[in-house]
Image (cartoon, helix red, strand yellow):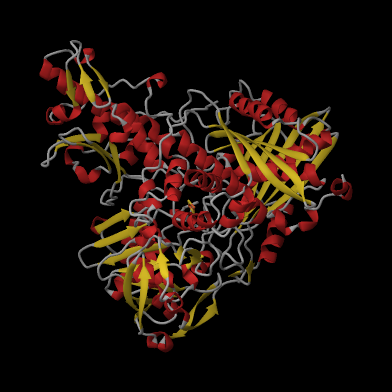
Amino acid sequence: MSTSKPTITFSRRDFMRTSSLASGGILIGFNLFTACKPEAKPPVDLASLNYNDFNAFIKIADNGAVTIFSPNPEIGQGVKTSMPMLIAEELDVAWDKVLVEQGVLDTNNYTRQVAGGSQSIRFGWEPLRQTGATARQMLVNAAASRWGVDPAECSTSEGVITNGAGETLGYGDVVKDAAGMEVPDKVKLKKKSEYKIIGKDTWNVDLDKIVTGQPLFGLDYKKEGMLIASVIRPPAFGQKLDSYDDSAAKQIEGVLDVVPFGDKIAVLAKDTWTAMKGKKALDVSWKNDSKLESTTDHDRILTGLLDGKEFQTLRADGDVKKAFAGADKVLERTYESPFLPHNCLEPMNFYADVRSDKIHLVGPIQTPERTAQEIAEKLGRNPDEIHLEMTRMGGGFGRRLYGDFALEAAEISHKAGKPVKVVFSREDDMAAGIYRPAIKYRIKAAVKDGKVTGYHLKEASVNSNMYGLIPNFFPAGAIENYQVDVAKHDSNITTGAWRAPYTNFLAFAEQSFFDELAEMMEVDKVQLRLDLLQKVKGTTDERIQYSPERMEEVIKTAVDKSGWGNQPDGVYQGFVNYYCHNSHVAEVANVEIEDGMPVVKKITCVVDCGIVVNPLGALNQIEGGVIDGVGHAMYGDFAFENGVPQSGNFDSYRLIRINEAPEVEVHLMENDFSPTGLGEPTLPPAGGAVANALKAATGKRLYKQPFIKYPELLTVPEKEIIG
Amino acid sequence: MPTYQIKVNGASRSVNVSEDTPLLWILRDHLDLVGAKYGCGIAQCGACTVHLDGQAVRSCVLTAAQVENKEITTIEGLSKDGSHPVQQAWKEVDVPQCGYCQAGQIMTAAAFLDKNPNPESQDIKSAMQGNLCRCASYSRIYKAVEKAASNMS
Ligand code: FES
Ligand code: FES
């Protein structure tokens, strides 16, 4: 069984280069994405490398000032703070003296990849610390040779090197010498007890700019001569452009151009409002191209898939059929979720200036490499001509993994021969989504002699199915006869990753199911989970993703911290434990009755994500993930009628608000495991914890999201109100 | 296009825009003040919040004619250097995740605390409920408003 993987092996010489700066000081460059790849391979031809091949830098000036250029997309998950912390720790400098800047991403080099999702810190943990330690060692070596002493007798602290005799040199004093030193191939990393930065509360590096409203985001980006493009797209999935009349649009003062491209039409103006107005004035007719699907179709089709026989089996242990045939009792339940838009608060937007000799792209994107490649292909250009800069992103949640909006900007700029920024209105953003697909799960369990002997999970989804690791999450390995089957319906509605893909709903389904299973078996709900985990301990099954020991710890801690089973009258609790994104989580929801309605008051959340690099940032992620999970389970709903999305803005799409947000109490497990994901794993369990607590309060079980759609299941029995 | 005289952050500015242009886009596109954000355009999210004669308003649904002769304050003008007690509290608590909604949150909180320097828990929640935070940084928004209130008193 593997709990901390993969092992990253590489040589620092393979990905680090140093050079003296004309302005004084030294620049240490490294290719973060290469270094952070689990299968990191050194570039083949080292001699041909230049600084364009590096995307992350440490700059140490002659006066000792340290700047760390963070290359990673910042979508609000805090990596622009936490990743440089790892470098600074091993470089052994004072954090408050470090300046962090967003590195420019130049997509000349296609060996990079973005460490996405909740993986940035996990993959960066080793190489980023190695990088800092290597730079530190070079500075120490330079000082030692100046003193004529053994580097081993030197120590460092906060940017100062001290030798055995107590003499000191600042990093700035030796940077010039260090630039000429060979990159050491072996360096020692600090022990956890020696950390001065890792594990300490560290404030967001962009905090000042954010609270004073300085330009940071793609939507804030401006360039001389830039036009705003407002784009009309087919209103329904399955429709194409038929014909259009732009005479009214062109009459609007300030509308400069109307540019059709593919099945879309862009209206260009100097300012956003005029462009949006121009778009509304277009008279367009659309024609049907493929089937216009509705939510009722999806409902029927997905149910049909679950009832049918066409499945792909992702994991099969033992013989579930036999287990069901020989069972004393069987429980089977179906769970249903809608499509969901991402609704990043900053709508999609991107700047493109396509010229004959070069292409300049700027904006919020999580996948600069792939996006630049797509643009090069679309326009028949050499990728070397593309220069892409990333801005801070007003949320991602998976939406900005897709570069459709950047591609639009490039196409329009190419056709119009002008620099343009595509700006989505909120309505555009919701209608041109890459949605979380609607999914249904059917779960069936067999119980014999008081034991769970069989477990069969079926998934019916739109366009794509759960990724291959998920069938190896809990309860895989815990139940002898276990099977996961998937089936999908191909739709013209675009779907993709949405914060914690698949698990964001699967956790609700499975954990509601365990709750009900425990009720049927008449055993304690938490004990059932603990009993199942016992069987996984010591397993030799390499595929199993989670650690039963770590899971057990979070469960026990959650029981303790939440006062599980030990609540005053009128407080109803729901329990969930879950593993995803390499982290183990348990959550307990507390529901109370107010004015005859059940209200989610509090979530206790216990997280084991290994060493916590930045507790202050971690808590923000955890609290946000939990509330986001509660919010979407309660309110998130998105329907289609003949291919047309039925919600267009926040008046018809409900997001959780501050008065609906429960208190979140967080407990982080303390251990020495390498850090794992935090941006996503606390979201999936939240919906299940709430559903289980609502069941305790109302006596009614929820099988479909969003819960608010089923008000009859959210009422409290008469006696509760009176009591 | 008509010309309007509007007063933003203490300075009088003259803008040439069509009469239906929302204040939000005047600020962002014509005056280079991008602190107020676009989130919905229909007064549902609060990202565009500014002060109009000290009141928190949604700049996405106000036109130039409606704000002439009134004092407009944007996040850029709330303080010279981010030293307003609400901004300070936001920093102390480390509120932002993606940060996109935060200028609007701060402007709502600042106008609210100006009138209710000693708010009850429920007052804070009802004052802030018009501002969406997609990252759900609500626990910290709440904490920061509480902190700002106590720092101000
Ligand atoms: S943009 Fe004005 S309230 Fe949303
Ligand atoms: S911090 Fe991202 S929307 Fe509020």
In the rendered view, tell whether residue A557 sits above or below residue A119.
above
Where is residue A363 drawn, in percent x and y?
A: 35, 58
Which residue is situated farthest in the front direction here?
Answer: B153
The structure residue drawn at horizontal position 85% and vertical position 49%, both measured from the top left corner, is A721
Q: Nearer the viewer, residue B141 or A706?
A: B141
Where is residue A445 drawn, in percent x and y?
A: 76, 38
Q: Give residue A638's quadrant in the image.
A: bottom right
Q: Is residue A494 visible?
A: yes
**Quarter of the figure with the C terminus of chain A:** top right
Horizontal side of residue B122 vs A198, given as left or right: right
Q: Nearer the viewer, residue A376 or B75?
A: B75
Q: Is residue B98 visible?
A: no
Q: Give residue A238's quadrant in the image.
A: bottom right
In the rendered view, tell whether residue A433 sits above or below residue A672.
below
Q: Nearer the viewer, residue A198 or B17?
A: B17
Horizontal side of residue A325 vs B72, given as left or right: right
Q: Give residue A320's quadrant in the image.
A: top right
Which residue is situated farthest in the top direction here?
Answer: A165
Where is residue A177 drawn, in percent x and y?
A: 12, 27
The structure residue drawn at horizontal position 52% and vertical position 80%, both measured from the top left corner, is A286
Where is residue B89 drawn, in percent x and y?
A: 45, 45
In the rendered view, tell whether residue A616 sits above or below residue A280.
above
**Quarter of the figure with the N terminus of chain A:** top right
In the rendered view, tell whether residue A311 sits above or below residue A343.
above
Horizontal side of residue A536 vs A149, given as left or right: right
Q: Nearer the viewer, residue A532 or A175?
A: A175
